[in-house]
Amino acid sequence: MRSLWLAHAVLAVGLLAGCSTEFEPAAPAATTPSETYAWVGPSGLEVESEQAARAVVQAQRAEAARLAAEAETRAAAEAAAAAAQQAAKDAAAARRAAATSDADNGADDGYVSSDLEVRCSDGTATVEECFGPGSDLNGNGITDINE
């Protein structure tokens, strides 16, 4: 019983000591440097947001590159079409220039060709019709100038 009475006494003293009206602040714990380091950087949400923004910028750049390539292709096709049209105009002008002689510059000089002249130039007239009688002495259809 004595031990029980001693236990009650120790308990009562402890309770009375804990209920005192004076407040004693607890001593600050001694801080020791920690071996683990705190992460100092962006949070996961910031990283995800940055990655999403980077993806958007990359998509915009790819779209801009695609549009530039399309514009370049379109410009090249337009330039090729313009060059082909100019070449066709130049060829038509060259044909017109070849059809007119340089001496008359396309003006009518009043010369009227005869039917015989046309047939001689086409090769449908005989040698004697074109060059006169006796031009084809041996009858081979070729002018006999040196024979």
Image (tube, rainbow, N blue to C red):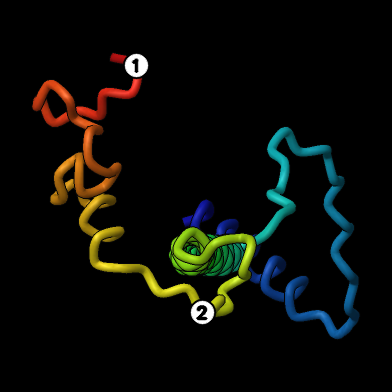
The residue beneath circle 1 is: 146
Q: Position of residue 63 (x, y in %)?
A: 49, 67
The secondary element bearing badge 1 is classed as loop
Residue plotted at (74% across, 52% down): 40
The residue beneath circle 2 is: 110
Q: Are marks 2 and 1 in contact (CB under 8 Å)?
A: no
Q: Amino acid at mark 2?
A: Gly
Along the horizontal axis of the image, is 115 left or right of 64? left
Q: Position of residue 77 (x, y in %)?
A: 45, 63
Most foreground residue, 29 or 78:
78
Quadrant in which the C terminus is drawn: top left
**145 is higher (above) or lower (below) than 103:** above
Residue plotted at (90% across, 80% down): 22
Q: Mark 2 or mark 1: which is in front?
A: 1
Determine if residue 36 is in view: yes
Residue plotted at (19% across, 30% down): 136
